[in-house]
Image: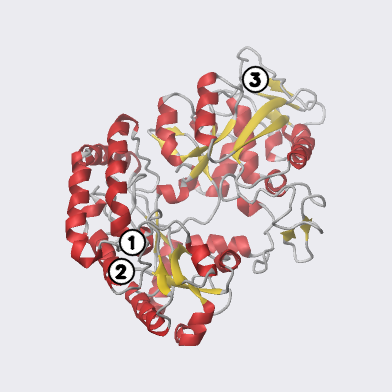
Amino acid sequence: MKRKVLSALLAATMVSGLLVGCGSSNTSSSSKSSTGSTTTSTSSDASVTKTDLGEYTEENPYHLVFSYIEFYQQDDAARTAVQDAMNEYMIPKYHIEVELLPMQASEYAQKVQLMISGGDELDVIPIFFSYASSWIAMNGIEDMTPYMDSPEGQAIIDTLGKDNAYVGSMNGILFGFPAQKESVELGGLCMRADICDELGITEEYGLAKNQDEYTGKVYDWSVAGDIFEKVKEAHPEMTPLYMQGSSSQINRLAFFDSLADNFGVLDWEADHDSTTVVNQYETDTYKNAISLLADWYDKGYIYQDALTDQQGSATMMKAGNTFSYMSAIKPGFLVEANASNGTECYAMYFGNNVEGGISTTNVSFYDTGIASNSADPEMAFKFISALYTDPEVMNLWQLGIEGTNYQVLDDGTAYYVDGEDASNFKYHQNTGWFMGNQFNTYVWNDGSRDTNYWEKLQSHNDWAQYSPAFGFMWDSSNYSTQITALQNALSTYRPALETGSVGTAGLEETLQKLNDALYAAGLQDVMDAKQEQLNTWLDENGATKTPQSNLDKIEAAKEANK
């Protein structure tokens, strides 16, 4: 598993044939990437992949270390079997031998950074957006821009769309590709179905079991206040809304383009087209949101221990102590919520607009990139392209071996093999939202999803109106000291403000203390630098435009809601 095939830099030699990585047949053609490296020949007499740094065949494949976060415990032997199955497929087709390197979420950042600085064998890595600037600064990430003119690069663009394909960029460096997933900010309340039925809420608002697909019907948050009033009157022993100080829900009430860290934002709610960086915590948008929470808290609608409570919404719902909580909502949300909460729930969309906002960090959350340690970045890029374009690769990594780890049902969806379930499976990653193209995997049958589920998620994204700064990534590497101080200041005051715990009487004073602490910590310097970087990016790229098809869909919903 440790062999590598390296050579001195090869002279660029054209090799007839299409890339093996594109899964092509023996059709004759030739192409060349902008790096000067040659592509793979797939003709029957010369199955070889040549790059500037190596030459690889089925007998002598490139050894690639693929690191990723393993969010759920897997059986070691089952994972090894999956790795073997991947290589049985990957080696003859791509001339790549994959070594899976799972990491725990708690160790991921430190481990990757240590491996990069130590020069360890490492190729494909997950890049959390907030780590990008520091890892780029330490020359730890490969710039993938030179490979984008290749067939593999074009395949990624065809899969993600051009805007999304380049969203993981900073200062002209393309450091990673986002997962293919739902990204638009749409949300509202998850509510106990039995209480809704009892109080007539179900009938009044047309709620139904497993009805969580967005249709453009959205309610103002004042309507939620009316619902909470009914619940509190009928069930004084039950908290209408559970909130928790350790988890901000401000984007449920008002969307900002956070420009990565919330220290200098675009006030999207006030002006969808604004490119002026402002202090979020001085905007009317923010003040209106926290004022609503403070009013609800005073009326007893919000859990009174929200500031310090650590139980979580699922625990409170199972105990029957709360009626609802705020959440992002998407198709399929309710099945997961029902299982987590131990009770049937309804979903109801709330917000200030029919459309939902979408920003760089909504899409570029975890990105798939290449470590600078890679012995042959072009081969690593070919593997990444396969993660986004080859269903066999993605299904093997995510679901395992068909017939051993999962079965395909008659309706075309997938589920555990007989004798296994969520409590005892041997291999089931279930993290397509994290890296690669989850839309290339089988739809997992959880009781509500059919084979059209991925199309529903893609349609869900069509409700997005883009921030004009979509694609801009703030480089904070020169402001790490200020960012740390700002985070400390925010953590001191944010939980009380964003759970309503300050009450209406203490809101103005606490908000002022927050802003004073932020400016003392260097907020203005950070905002000025962020605005300067954004202006440069806008000069080079122009403001991002929302696809016309999205705008048409949004406008039609607005007309229908009149």
For mark 1, give the secondary structure. Answer: loop
Residue 515 picture location, percent across and down: 20, 49
The residue nearer to you, when weighing 185 against 544, is 185
- Labelled pair 2, 1 in contact (Cβ < 8 Å): yes
Q: Nearer the viewer, mark 2 or mark 3?
A: 2
Q: Which mark is residue 297?
A: 2
For mark 3, give the secondary structure. Answer: loop
Q: Nearer the viewer, mark 1 or mark 3?
A: 1
Mark 1 vs 3, N-terminal side:
3
Q: Which mark is residue 112?
A: none
The residue nearer to you, when weighing 259 against 460, is 259
Q: Residues within 10 Å of mark 3 (few under 14, many from 20)?
A: some
Q: CA distance from mark 2 to mark 1?
A: 8 Å
Q: In the rendered structure, which amino acid carries the disc numbered 3?
A: Thr
Mark 2 vs 3, N-terminal side:
3
Q: Residues within 10 Å of mark 2 (few under 14, many from 20)?
A: many
Q: How many marks?
A: 3
Q: CA distance from mark 2 to mark 3?
A: 70 Å
Mark 2 vs 1, N-terminal side:
2
Q: Residue at x 33, y 61 (%)?
A: 499
In the picture provided, is 36 more to the left or to the right than 79? Answer: left
Residue 394 picture location, percent across and down: 67, 46
For mark 2, give the secondary structure. Answer: helix
Q: Quadrant of the C terminus?
A: bottom left
Residue 560 picture location, percent across and down: 41, 79
Residue highlighted by disc 3: 13
Q: Is residue 434 visible?
A: yes
Residue highlighted by disc 1: 499
In the picture provided, is 452 more to the left or to the right than 138? Answer: right
Q: Residue at x 63, y 33 (%)?
A: 66
Residue 7 picture location, percent across and down: 66, 14
